[in-house]
Image (tube, grey):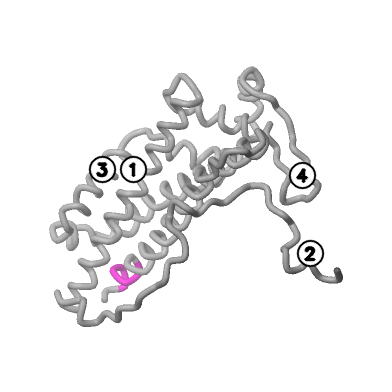
Amino acid sequence: MDSDERAFLLLIGHVQNEINSLNKVFTWCLNNSKSGKSSAEGLADGMQAMIYARLLAGKLCETWEVLRKYYFATKLSQRVDSKLPLESEKALTSLKLYFGKSNLIHQVRNSFAFHYSAEQFESNWEGAADEGDLSIILGRTIGNNLSIAGELVANRALLNHGDSKSLPDGFTKFFDDIHSISSCFTDFAEGVTIVILRSRMGENLESFAVEEEIASLLNYEDVCIPFFVNPVSRSNSNKGT
């Protein structure tokens, strides 16, 4: 392979792994809708999901930079675009349209994901205070502490970067954006990987594959990641009794 082709193939695979993993964690945090939870638990689970949503948004923005620098600027796109599967071609078109103009994912990346701005928190705390309780949960262990105040202000600041008029609408728009853009990047990455591999290894990629069955212990929708956890494992808590 040419060096630019090889570097992009490896990098896009790495990026796709990160997007898939963050997407799963974000979804599994949202799955914590069990009845009987305290108000603090429900609030903490939702805020934890938002933390991963913002990280995912930052990664999605960086992924577009990967395409811009290592796919378009290197002219690799000129050799690959015409060979992309239809779904990958549509996904790439959607990505160009989204990142070709001002967008929420880019704004979140710059202020709430990979960079911190004390000014954003100072200018948005009063609006957050009007809508919620700026409290802090002390969970007896460091891992279970939660600044509700910090997250409410971060959410208010994020909303003010968009064009929504209410927090629910703003969250819906944000979630829709990261879901659709994640899907587009995944569709594109899969297609471009196949195109590059076939160009070097031939059309019959299956002849190089080894099939392995993986036992799935849980359904996707059955996995949930709570915020509050027991800091002592059950196996350790029984020692000495």
Q: What type is the residue that disc 4 sits on?
A: Gly
The Cα–Cα distance between marks 1 and 4, rounded to whole angstroms, is 36 Å
Which label sits in the foreground, 2 or 1? 2
Of 149 and 198, nearer the camera is: 149
Relative side of 16 to 89, left or right: right
Relative side of 95 to 201, left or right: right
Q: How many marks?
A: 4
Secondary structure at numbered mark 3: helix
The Cα–Cα distance between marks 4 and 2, rounded to whole angstroms, is 18 Å
Secondary structure mainly formed by the magenta segment: helix
Q: What type is the residue that disc 3 sits on?
A: Ser
Task: Looking at the image, tell me whether mark 4 or mark 3 is earlier in sequence order.
Answer: 3
The Cα–Cα distance between marks 2 and 1, rounded to whole angstroms, is 44 Å
Q: Which residue is mark 4?
A: 139
Q: Quadrant of residue 178?
A: top left
Which label sits in the foreground, 1 or 3? 1
Q: Which residue is mark 1?
A: 180
- Name the residue rendered at 43%, 57% in the picture: 219
- Name the residue rendered at 79%, 67% in the picture: 238
Answer above or below: position of 31 versus 198.
above
Q: Which residue is mark 3?
A: 94
Residue 88: x percent and y percent? Answer: 22, 54
Q: Which residue is mark 2?
A: 237
